[in-house]
Image: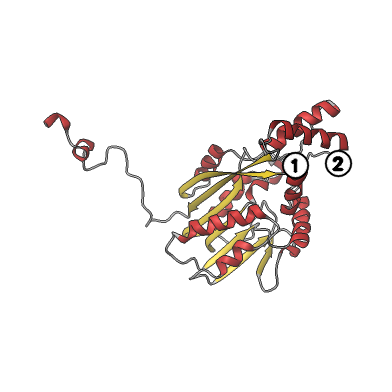
Amino acid sequence: MSTMSEIPRLFDTDLLARRRVRALRTHGQDGDFLLREVVEDMLDRLSIVMRPFPRVAELGGHTGLLASALAHRQGTEAVIRLEQHPSLFHDGEQATLFDPENLPLKPQSCHLLVSPLFLHWINDLPGVLIQIRQTLMPDGLFLATLLGRDSLSELRQSFLIADSEMSGGASPRVAPLPDLKDMGSLMQRAGFALPVVDHDTLTVRYASLFSLMQDLRRMGATNVLHDRSRHPLRRDTLMRAAEVYQQRFSDPDGRIRATFQIISLSGWGPDASQQKPLKPGSAKISLASVLGDKSAS
C-alpha cells in the first residue's frame, strides 16, 4: 500500500468535512436528496440477502440515514458510524472519528460495511478498499455507492468554456471521478470475493445552474479539490457558465439537465464456503448435450 507521502492529494478532505457539517446543520437529514435515493437503493439490495449482519459499520454516511435504517434491520446487534467531524454524529450513536485514508477498525471486525456516496472523495481509494476488505469478517459483505466519471459532465463543460472565455484558462471546479471499469479492477485488486460493479444514471432537471449549485451546497458537495482556486468565483464567469449551460443542456421547456452516474459496489470477505468459479475444461456435461445435438436429428 502506498504511503501518504506518495498519494496525490486530489481532495481537501478537511474542507469536505466542514461543508458536510454546514449542510447537515442547515438542512438536516432530509437535505441531501441524492443520498436519500442512494440509501433506498442500498436497502433494496440488502433486502435480498437473507441473512443477519450483527456488526455493521457505516463509512462516511454524512447524515446517518443508512446507519439508522440498518440499526432496525433484523439481526443487527451494533452499528458504528465513522465520520470526520463530531458534529456529524447524533445522540446515542456508536461513533468514531477517522482519517479518510486510514480506517480505525480491527481486522475481521465487521459482518457488513456500507458506504453511501463517500468513496469518490478518497485520495487513496485503492488503499482504502484493501483496508475495507481486511476489516470484513470471512463471508462479510461490503456495499457502497459513489459518483462515477459521467456525473455533472454538463456542469464541467459549461465552466470549462466560461473560464476559457472570461479568463483565458481553465480552473479546476468539478472533481475528477472514478470510471466504472477502473472500479471493477480495483475491487479485484483489493481481494474481494465475488465482486460486482454496476451503475445507474439519474438525470435531474433544474430551473437553472443556480438551482443545481444550491442542491450541491445542500449535499455538502461543492468544490473541495485541493488545487482549486482560492479566489472567489468571478460573477462574469458564473453568469457565462449559466448561459452556456442553458444553451447546450436545456430541454424545450427551458429546464436544464444534470447527470448523476451512481456506481454501486459489492464484494465479500473471502471464505472457504463461498462458491468458486469452475476451472476451464472441468465441466462434466458437454454444451452439445445441454442444447441438443442437432446433427443427430
Question: Does 58 sit left or right of 266 as displayed?
Answer: right
Report if the CB atoms under discs 2 and 1 are less than 8 Å apart.
no
Q: Nearer the viewer, mark 2 or mark 1?
A: 1
Q: CA distance from mark 2 to mark 1?
A: 25 Å
Specify the farthest residue to the bottom: 92
> Could you tell me residue 217's position as x and y percent?
76, 51
Kind of residue at badge 1: Ser
Above or below for 14 versus 159: below
Instruction: Answer left or right for 8 relative to 70.
Output: right
**SS of the residue at dot 2?**
loop
What x and y, as percent, mark residue 93? 66, 70
Rendered view: 175 above or below 194: above
Q: Amino acid at mark 2?
A: Arg
Residue pictured at 56% horizontal, 49% vertical? 130
Residue 134 appears anywhere in the view: no
Nearest to the observer: residue 101 or residue 23:
23
The one of 108 and 152 positioned closer to us in this rendering? 152
The N terminus - image quarter: top right
- Is 52 left or right of 36, judged from the image as shown? left
Q: Is residue 49 above or below residue 72?
A: above
Residue that numbered label 2 is attached to: 230
Residue 293 falls in which quadrant of the image?
top left
Marked residue nearer the N-terminal end (2 or 1): 1
- Residue at horizontal 73 percent and vertical 45 percent from the top: 212
Badge 1: residue crowd in 10 Å (few <14, some 14–19, many ≥20)? some
Residue receiving disc 1 = 208
147 vs 178, nearest the viewer? 147
> Which numbered disc covers residue 155?
none
Question: What residue lies at 22% left-to-right and 43% top-to-bottom?
Answer: 284
Q: Residue 203: give x, y in percent of width and height.
A: 61, 43
